[in-house]
Image (spheres, rainbow, N blue to C red):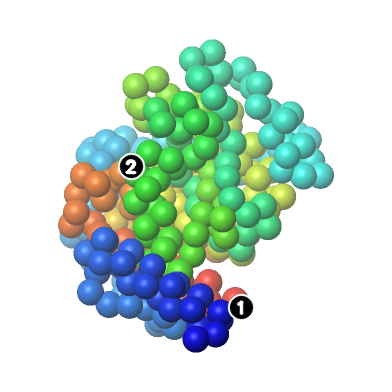
Amino acid sequence: MSDKSADLRLLLQRAIKAQIDLGMDELILTPIKESAPPRPDVVADKWPTDETKAPEVMMETPPLTQFETLEDHRLAICDCQKCSLGASRNKFVYGVGNTQADLMFIGEAPGADEDRIGEPFVGRAGQLLDRILAAIELSRQEVYIANILKCRPPGNRDPQPDEMELCFGYLHEQVRLIKPKLICALGRIAAQALLKTTTPLGKLRSRWHEFSGVPTLVTYHPAALLRFASYKRDTWEDMKLLKARYESMK
């Protein structure tokens, strides 16, 4: 068996295992037609269950200073004290992955594990995100992963609108420097903030939006899947839609 065939076989084995872990029963290796519009009975994920409690304002605010590289940007902002989270954080959580990625995932804020290590999505939710990526034949080394907030809210509470507003320019600069072709918003809070809407997550799914000029898809946060296994099927449909468009760009 050639090295290329062996690599392909290993890739297929990993994709199949990842999909089994997610409870899926089909393997997607080629572009798929876009799925049907979202069902009206699909509800938002867990933070909070009252969907009326949405971020009130998220600005399309450009950064005041533009940088040459992500590392220059990270070094310039890693000691940020613009809000109270700067004093309570353990580590500033900037982002991780391919700095020239075509696909960028954006969540809401770091959790306890992320605050301890300084990297986004490294806890249980992050491990599930890794399996989701494997199911569509990707890895965190190929994509870029970041959050709206760069510091952990105390007790993993929801990000506050003023905190997100202060941090939003940082995210804009990350997107400008990476130049992704696609963005996937993870969870209700991230999706509503990026899209400047109070529409429930269930109604934002299954169709393309736009953030900062980049086509953007919305899906459940991996942490929600750990709490509500019934969301896995909808998430898999979202990932098929994402993979189809991602493959079509190659």
* Amino acid type of the residue tagged 1 in the rendering: Lys
Relative depth, front residue between 152 and 65: 152
Query: Which residue is the site of mark 2?
Result: 124
- Numbered disc in front, either 1 or 2: 2
Q: Residue at x 59, y 36 (%)?
A: 94
The disc placed on residue 250 is 1
Question: Residue 51, can we see it?
Answer: no
The disc placed on residue 3 is none
Q: Residue at x 41, y 54 (%)?
A: 130
Q: Secondary structure at mark 2?
A: helix
Q: Is residue 32 above or below residue 184?
A: below
Image coordinates of residue 233 in percent, x first then y, are 24, 64
Question: Residue 232, can we see it?
Answer: yes
Image coordinates of residue 121 in percent, x first then y, are 44, 42
Q: Secondary structure at mark 1?
A: loop
Relative depth, front residue between 49 and 178: 178
Query: Marks 1 and 2, Cα distance to the nearest angstrom?
Result: 31 Å
